[in-house]
Amino acid sequence: MIVITPDVRIVHSRSSARPIEYAVTLRVHRGDRYRTIHLFDNAHDESEHHEHRYIGFEKQQPPSAVWRGPWRAAMATAVVKLKVEWADILDDWERS
């Protein structure tokens, strides 16, 4: 977990066995809990990566980006993107 502010964090996890499955989420504390507002994952295949945004609470949207490549590189790219763009992503989510 990477704490950005007291109410914003990046949470990442991956499986320990092949095929590797991972998720990198941007989460914000609202109400009584942390809520996912942006997600990167490879739920369908180890080398197929998705980026999802959320609208409101718990409303995952279809992937806004899909690409293929190594899971390690995709996971690292997701973390960097969220570190750099978290404020804009949060603003977009709050306006939705």
Image (cartoon, rainbow, N blue to C red):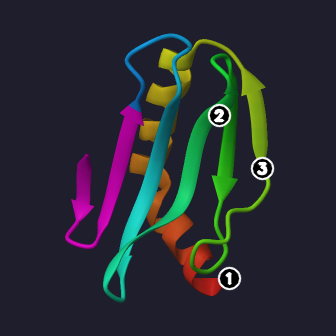
Q: What separation in Å lies between label 3 and label 2 (alpha carbons)? A: 15 Å
66 left or right of 40 in image: right
Dot 1 or dot 3, earlier in sequence: 3
Tell me the chief SS of the magenta region. Answer: strand
Q: Residue at x 44, y 57 (%)?
A: 26
> Magenta stretch containing residue 11, yes or no?
yes
**Left or right: where 8 falls relative to 22:** left
User: Percent from the top left, x then y, of residue 52?
Assistant: 67, 52
Q: Does the magenta stretch include residue 34?
A: no
Inspect the image, locate mark 3, and give the three-letter code of the amino acid beneath it. Ser
Residue identifier under label 3: 64
Magenta stretch, residue numbers: 1-13
**Callout 2 amino acid:** Ala
Residue marked by disc 2: 43
Distance, label 1 to label 2, CA atoms, is 25 Å
Q: Are marks 1 and 3 in contact (CB under 8 Å)?
A: no
Mark nearer the N terminus (3 vs 2): 2
Q: Farthest residue in the bottom direction? A: 31
Q: In which quarter of the image is residue 62?
A: bottom right
